[in-house]
Amino acid sequence: MEYTWILAPVLLLGSVAHAQETAGNRPFLFIAHRGASYLAPENTLASINLAWELGADAAECDVMLTSDDRVIVFHDKNTGRLTEKNDVVSETPWKDLSELTVRPRETNLPDYGSERIPLLEEVLKTIPEGRMLVIEIKTGTEILPWLKMDVDRYWKSGSIAFIAFDLETIRQAKLIFPEVPCYYLSTFRKDLRKHFDAIVDSGLDGVDLRHGMIDRRLVGKCNEAGLDVWCWTVNDPATARELKDIGVTAVTTDRPDWLRQNL
């Protein structure tokens, strides 16, 4: 199917109205970016648990695959930025990675100086009823069988969603987990235009976009095609308020409690 990106005024007005109606019918979610990463080291059990304690609607985490096929919660391809070693995650067994301490950033509270890299199975067990864990898949499709195994075994409460920058990976995730919301991540409008038809045809639930690329027209176009719109990463109340007003339904933030209080 084809979509025209230069809309006639009457169609644009219709899309905007639909976007506003959609936003009005959905709650506005605050998603804790890599957990409550402003206060605790990113992607650790401490940051995820703190996100729940602070009342975040959802906590986002990243997953990678180790050399021995364990799904870990970690953002980078190697460990150099966040630990004392510089191991390539895909070439390192879980036993070695489990011994590394995640380096806090300057805004983290002093209590969190000895956090370790967790397995996804550990994080899945933390989801409270009524909350969501948003799982960003940082690899290709090779992780999906192991991801399914962990989800089937350890997801017992709350809800989950998947997001990914790789279109084929998120498409395959939707086929494997048809009941789980799946969102395509994008940084630039050119990329979204390129993949828009495939996103719609794949039955994905929506898109998760860099907040700077979003405007009212774009939200209207996505909603018209049946796509929900989330965004990342917003730590400014005025920006969050503007995005909410134009129909974005979830904002990813490092400071979920602070942003909610100041919105």
Image: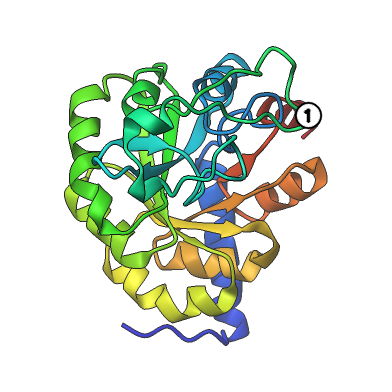
Image height check: is 18 above or below 173? below
User: Which secondary structure, mark 1?
Assistant: loop
Residue 141 percent coordinates (x, y): 26, 57
- For disc 1, the marked residue is 107
250 relative to 212, above or below: above
Q: Nearer the viewer, residue 10 or 143?
A: 143
Between 240 and 48, the one lying in front of the other is: 48
Residue located at (36% from left, 77% from top): 197
Can the viewer see residue 162 in this picture?
A: no
Q: Quadrant of the C terminus?
A: top right
Q: Position of residue 133 (x, y in %)?
A: 43, 32
Give the residue at x 50% y 24%. Answer: 116
Residue 12 position, x and y percent, is 59, 76
Above or below residue 32? Residue 243 is: below
Q: Nearer the viewer, residue 196 or 123?
A: 123
Q: Residues within 10 Å of mark 1 (few under 14, many from 20)?
A: few
Amino acid under label 1? Thr
> Residue sitting at 45 percent across and 81 percent down?
194
Q: Quadrant of residue 15?
A: bottom right
Quadrant containing the N terminus is bottom left
Q: Nearer the viewer, residue 15 or 211?
A: 211
Relative horizontal placement of residue 156, taking residue 19 as reference (left or right):
left
